[in-house]
Amino acid sequence: MDKRVFAADRAAVDAEISRMKPLVELGGYIPCPDHRIPLEAEWDLVRYYCDRLKKLSGDKRQGKRIKIPLGLADTEGTGVPPVNGAGRFHAVVSL
């Protein structure tokens, strides 16, 4: 996910979402920025991005918090993503 779109405009955010849409529709891919959002980011564009992703994913929840585990890849072929350190999470996202 190219987080630089948060410093551009809604058209740039829409283009980035369109670019990632096929991966999202496959399932299992959470398009979120890595590390920190740039200082030049516009908060309204970040919120717009979150709203658009909720619509794309069909998520009807409002104000829910999602915990994203540290390990998202299935490294052992079990079909279950590993969580490194029980109860530890990389990020908590409020939608």
Image: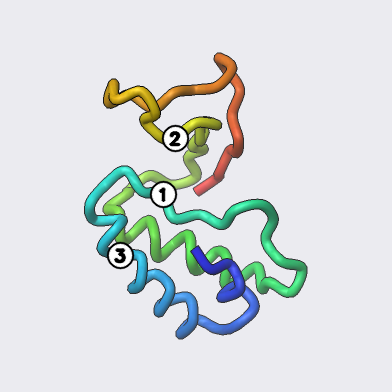
**For mark 1, what is the residue?**
30
Which is more foreground, mark 2 or mark 3?
Answer: 2
Label 2: which secondary element: loop
Is 39 placed left or right of 80 in the picture?
A: right
Give percent across and percent down for residue 19: 35, 72
Query: Few, some or many C-alpha atoms within 10 Å of disc 1 (few <14, some 14-19, many ≥20)?
Result: some
Give percent across and percent down for residue 66: 49, 37
Q: Identify the mark nearer the N-term, 1 or 2.
A: 1
Give the amino acid at mark 3.
Answer: Lys
Give the amino acid at mark 1.
Answer: Ile
Q: Where, by quadrant of the figure, is residue 94 drawn?
A: top right
Tell me, yes or no, whether the two marked residues, 1 and 2, touch with CB atoms within 8 Å. yes
Q: CA distance from mark 3 to mark 1?
A: 11 Å
Query: Few, some or many C-alpha atoms within 10 Å of disc 2 (few <14, some 14-19, many ≥20)?
Result: some
Give percent across and percent down for residue 77: 29, 25
**For mark 2, what is the residue?**
72
**For mark 3, what is the residue?**
21
Toward the left, the furthest residue is 26
Label 1: which secondary element: loop
Q: Identify the mark nearer the N-term, 3 or 1.
A: 3
Is 72 placed left or right of 37 in the picture?
A: left
Looking at the image, residue 16 lies above or below residue 23: below
Query: Few, some or many C-alpha atoms within 10 Å of disc 3 (few <14, some 14-19, many ≥20)?
Result: some
Query: Which residue is found at the position 50% from the left and 68% from the top?
Result: 48
Of residues 18 and 94, which is closer to you in this image? Answer: 18
Q: CA distance from mark 2 to mark 3?
A: 19 Å
Which is more foreground, mark 1 or mark 2?
Answer: 2
Label 3: which secondary element: helix
